[in-house]
Image: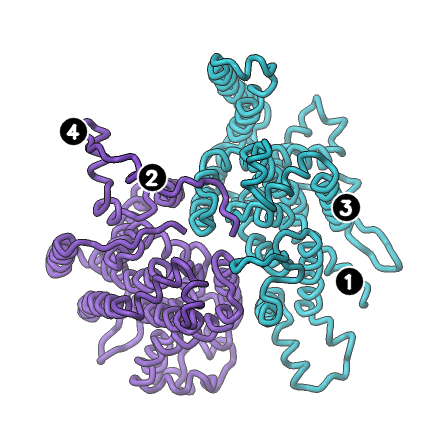
Chain colours: A cyan, B purple
Amino acid sequence: MLLDSLFNGVAIGSVLLVAALGLAIVFGLMGVINLAHGELMMLGAYTTYVTQLIFKLPLLKPYYNAYVIVSIFFAFIVSGVVGILLEKTVIRKLYGNPLETLLATWGVSLILQQFVRSVPLAYGTGLVISLIIGLFLPSVFSSKVKESIKFKYAKFISWIFAALAAVFSGNLISSSVSKLSRASARNVDVTAPAWMRGQVEIFGTAFPKTRLMIIIITLISVIAITLFLNQSAWGMRIRAVTQNREMCDCLGISTEKVDVLTFGIGSGLAGVAGVAVSLLGSVGPNVGGNYIVGCFMVVVLGGVGNLLGTIFASFGIGIMTDLIGAGRLLSIWPDMPLPLSNTINFFATTSMARVMIFALIVIFLQFKPTGLFPQKGRMVES
Amino acid sequence: MEFKNLKLSKKTTFVIWVLIIAFIIAAPSILPVFRLNLLGRYLSLAIVALGVDLIWGFTGLLSLGQGIFFALGGYCAAMYLQITSSSEFPNNIPEFFGLYGVDNLPFFWEPFRSPIFSLFAIWVIPALVAGILGFLVFRNRIKGVYFSILTQAALLVFFNFFNGQQKLINGTNGLKTDVTQLFGQMVGSESIQRMFFWFTALLVIAAWFFSKWVVKGRFGNILIGIRDDEPRVRFTGYNPVLFKTIIFSIAGGLAGISGALYTVQSGIVSPQFMTVPFSIEMVIWVAVGGRGTLLGAILGAVLINYAKSLVSEALPASWMFIQGGLFILVVTALPEGVLGWVQGEGPRNLLQRLGLKRKIETYPSLEIKNQTGGLKNE
């Protein structure tokens, strides 16, 4: 019984964790509140859907079973690229003004939602492909070209190339996959491949395989991001810029590049979370909104600037949600006094469990206002 | 946050007020009933926008949860109307209770039989809830984006709670008011609605005078001080928690009044008032109008909502794009809103860009603003 609860809690928590991970990085390292994070997740979920349909084409049919794995990479790239575009166009102008960033990213999230509703997914895919080409093609030129004045022509040409690619790939996809050729506001469903359906028995209890897959995705993302931040050169630069931006600038670290990279990775992780979310239920334009507040609660509870806090907070919230929402406390302790059991029954639905969790978080913040693992500092405004 | 305190000149304020009042007086005779009712609703939204301006424009607290207090006011008004016109239903309680097998009025609705209590409850209850919530958050020096996130989470929690409680407040269906009775007439009838329009218009003006009075003098100065440099206010010997709690509960009370007026004019209150987008929209009305101007909040609320209804009638899909674009545009290009732009350098810069006005040369040192750029270590 307890094991059941623990597993369910870990499953809920791991979705929260993978969703909050990107947010924690962007918020913790850059101080940017990204309300469009949920919509980046939504893009990841739609990427899974598109990948699935493309893998149903005769050419790729033999590899259909692997589409989930492939879509994780695709989702990371798609959301990451959209995130980079967002950083370069909007967020860059607003560093140091978190409240303004919050409003602007909310505007972005509205636009992304409506975009998915009113643009056919095939052309949306084409647009993303052109973004990838346009943003990354200039960087393949040799450094000699990059430093010359003519580099802007090279950039211009690569954007033209990107636009052509968008039209071409959009038409190709929409003509070969009819489901993607029309815009629709309806929810779509991602069906898990055969090897991910069904259940696995661990310690005598049955666990759905999709949940297990999500836990594995989460685990890999957490390990990868920790290794990246702590072992790689760029990870070190990111951490350095977090600690002292001016000094890094003086030492020749391109803080601009670091910002783009950090935001791109945070957004890419949202895409990975989107893959996980698409495995749980149907995918619609509003799918991100269901998770965003939960993610923020994780970040607030966990404290800023520490991934460990994020991990603890999301599993804590996950386990508590299951304990309260499924009314499991009653079965663990059957003969508790009546008023207490009535209270617990009152909160024993998923939505009421949220009410209870919020109350608990506010109470917790009365004692530790900066979260589980706060950043240490001596500033007045820390 | 770099933010200049906007002072509208007397002339601008006067002109705008003359226009507003002329419009309000003329509206009932030039607008069809349907549009007049819409205008009345949008005027009631102007009151909640005034509250947002008080806490965000003057005190620097960006609350994304004003929908809570808005809906609470709406529920208080709707419940009073439902109870007073429930004499023909079984057990003398509103009809919907019967659907869920509730025979007695829940105890906390009992006082709403009294009109005087209800009239107070509409603004006192939201103000109290805001005060308690605010105190718990401010006490721990939670501020900035953390405050915004917590208010948003609180909003979601209240939404879940109201959505799930059928037996107490009719859950997701909400409470209807248009078929209830007031002064012996249907609330949805034209004469009562016309009365509500005048009442709302008067209350908007009263709320503006009240807000003006709040931000005037020392109290207002401390609010602005908190917005610009809170630690310094604290070190000077003031307790920011107290001031923030007071202003937050004032804004909550205003939201409650606004919600009650909106409810009786739209005919229903439901948990939809507590959705996340609606509360963020309230902020954008103020941002577009010009925060810290009070008048901008009123203008923003009425004009944006009117534009919204016109655009969504003509092109339903495009409003989301326009609204999203508006958020981004206002934040990046017009941080002081339309009124701030008109009042500041905006028109002159525009004319200069178009080559219609000569550029004025000044010493470069006068034009250096905040040039540090990048992230500030906060």
What residue is pinned by disc 4?
B356
> Which callout, 1 or 4, points to the residue nearer the camera?
4
Q: Which numbered marker is on residue A98? A: none
> Which callout, 2 or 4, points to the residue nearer the camera?
2
Q: Is A101 rendered above or below residue A322?
A: above
User: How many other residues sit within 10 Å of disc 1, few (<14), some (14-19) or many (≥20)?
Assistant: some
Real-space Cα separation, disc 2 to disc 4, in angstroms: 25 Å
Query: What is the three-letter code of the residue carrying label 4?
Result: Leu
Q: Residue A187: where, in percent of width, then height?
A: 55, 44
What residue is pinned by disc 2?
B368
Query: What is the three-letter code of the residue carrying label 1?
Result: Leu
Mark 3 and mark 2 in contact? Answer it, CB < 8 Å: no
Real-space Cα separation, disc 3 to disc 4, in angstroms: 64 Å
Mark 1 and mark 3, same subunit? Answer: yes
Is A142 displayed left or right of B88 in the figure? Answer: right
Q: Residue at x 41, y 66 (%)?
A: B233
Real-space Cα separation, disc 1 to disc 2, in angstroms: 59 Å
Q: Residue B240: where, in percent of width, then height?
A: 42, 69
What residue is pinned by disc 1?
A6
Mark 3 and mark 2, same subunit? Answer: no
Mark 2 and mark 4, same subunit? Answer: yes
